[in-house]
Each structure stands twice: as structure tokens, then as C-alpha cells.
Image (tube, rainbow, N blue to C red):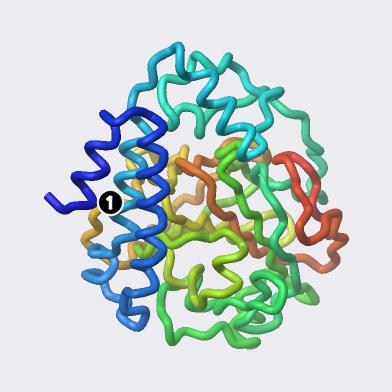
Amino acid sequence: MSILEQALKRAVGLGYLKWGLIFGLANGMAVYSYYRENRNKYDLEAYQQSVTRYVSYQSGKMAETYIPKWLRSPLFQLFGYVYDVNYEDMLEPLENYENFQQFFTRKIKSREFDKNVNKLIVPADSKVLSFCEVRDDSPILVKNVHYKLGYFLTGQETFEMSPQILEDAKKRKNTKLYSVIFYLAPGDYHRYHLPSDFQLKSRSHIVGHLAPVKISYISSTPKVYETNERVALFGTYKFGLMSIVLVGATNVGSMTLNYDKEFQTNQKAQELFVYKHYDPTISLRKGDELGMFRLGSTVVMMFEAENVKWNVEEGQKCKWGDVFAEVS
């Protein structure tokens, strides 16, 4: 048993204050180790041995540790104070959540949203990192930082989304492709929803690291999105092509898909890339819950449209169900 594993296991018996300190130390070790990993070695063995994956897996396990009922309310209130949690839309009182995992993945009161097919809704309580037209292989990630779209969507470092490939991918004439990125903070509601009616045609699961995805980190560290574990959903909506990519991060125990209960991430993988084609396609309805992050992370969308009117600004905090774009 490694020193880190012993420390993590002992933490449960040290009291929740000491547990929090060790939890923070583990996060620091994950980030430091990520820097030291061979960033040019992107094979299955390298990912399986990634310290970021190990710490995230252990964090997920520790988040399932039972919390005494008398301690739940003050503990979750302290967490909420630090991470600006919205308590007003919770369905249950704080003392009903037996562990942090239940609190992180809590359900909330139902929300009304615009059902107009021309309006795309925010998939999760989140912050808008960026939005842009996709003209080539380098859409905007955050200000002055770009990511490699081909590598991000396929897991192949050398695959480039050339303008011609992007043009061929479109389903309609005289349209453009757009990208929008939503970042979920630790205090946000952790479930994600469909931004529109969606015909799901295929899914790819790309094994990777679980490095932090907070703005300060991705702004200074290259290829975080391209090398983190992610799940890409490909399909169509009323106005053409649409993809929804769920990006893992440090301490995200797993990502789930409601339509596929057996699907799991952050497990010991046998393959670096797993592709699944759906025949017939799966019809998903706008606003339906798609799945959840077991802690915060990122949703990246790409969609096709002839015209777009953006209803958000970069850096804006949104709730799932808000309209972020009007399209045609």
C-alpha cells in the first residue's frame, strides 16, 4: 500500500477537519504529479498509472464516506459558504444527505424552460467560458487560449479538423459550426441536461488524465482538454450537427449517462478509445437529465446553425434551462 493510499485511508479516522487538510494535500500532489508526468506519452499504460486518475478515484470513494447526521448540516453549510451553493432549489434538507457524494449529485426542484426549438438551453448550472464560430482545428478555450478540436473529439493527437473536414461534417448548406463551453464549479448542481431535442447516433469514450479544469489551470497548462478523460456524444438536432462532450477533471469520481446505466468512467480501462454506434438512433428530449458529474467539471458543445444570436457573455454564470442561443 502506497504512502498516499495509507494517508487517504487513515484520513477518515482523523476527523473531518484533518480529513479536509489531507484531501487538499492530495489535490496538490495530483497537480504536481501531473506536471511531472510524461505529457508526450499518451498510451493506455500512461493513463492507467496517472496519479490524477488515482487521486480522483480515491476522492470519489472518500466522498461516499458516511457523515453522522448531527454533522451534515454544519459541514454542508460550510462547504456552501466557500463554494457559493444555491440552497433554495434543493429538494431535501441538508441532514438527509448521508455523504458528500449525495450532496454533490443532489436533485433539485423542477425548472421551467423555453421549449421553442429555435432556442438552445444551458445544459448545466455553470459559467460560460467561451463561445465562437468554429472555422478550423483551434476553437477558443478561454481568452487567448485555444484547443485542438480534432485531438479533443477523436483522441488522436495527429488528427486535424481541417476546414474541408468541418464543411463535410455539416448536414445543411449555408450553415456554420459553433462551439460553446460551460464550466461547473464544485458548488454547482452537478447534473447535466439536454440543450435541445437530440438524435444520438454514436458515443466515444476517451481514456485520459484527470487534471484540473479550472480557468487558472487551463490558461497556463497546454492540452488539458485534449488529454483529460472525456465522453463525446455525436448526433443531430433540428438545425444540423450537434456534439456534446463531457470532460472529466481532478476529483471527478465518474461521469454517468442516464440512457446507459452500465457506462462507467475513471475505471481501469482495457482500451484507450471505445466507440459505440447506435442503430437505431436514440431520441433524447430537450431538458431531460442526461447524466451527472460526481463533482464539477465541463460540458463542451458544438452545433451547426445558419444564424445564431448569443444570449450570454463570456464569464457569465448561468442555470440549466437558461437560453444561451437562438438559432435557425
> Which residue is pictured at 86% across the width and 54% down the height?
311
The outermost residue toward the left is 1
Helix, strand or loop under label 1: loop
Q: Quadrant of residue 10?
A: top left
Above or below: residue 112 compared with residue 310? above
Q: Position of residue 310 (x, y in %)?
A: 85, 59
Residue 120 horizontal/vertical position (percent): 76, 50
The answer to whether residue 235 is visible is no
Residue 241 percent location from the top left of the image:
64, 64
Q: Residue at x 71, y 66 (%)?
A: 304
Tell how many labels: 1
- Residue 300: tell me if it is visible: yes
Residue appearing at x 61%, y 38% in the figure? 82
Q: Determine crowd level at label 1: few under 14, some 14-19, many 20+ residues with C-alpha closer than 10 A.
A: few
For residue 317, above or below residue 187: below
148 displayed left or right of 263: right
In this rendering, is residue 271 above or below 279?
A: below
Nearer-the-camera pick, 288 or 197: 288
Describe residue 23's horizontal placement relative to residue 13 as left or right. right
Residue sitting nearer the eye, 25 or 101: 25
Residue 224 in the figure: left or right of residue 327 = left
| 7 left or right of 105 in image | left
Q: Nearer the viewer, residue 101 or 135?
A: 101
Where is the C terminus found, in terms of image quarters?
Answer: bottom right
Please provide percent x and percent y for residue 278: 43, 53
Q: Which residue is mark 1?
A: 267
Q: Amino acid at mark 1?
A: Gln
For the point 64% across and 71% down, the residue is 141
* Up-down relation of residue 95 to residue 47 (above or below): above
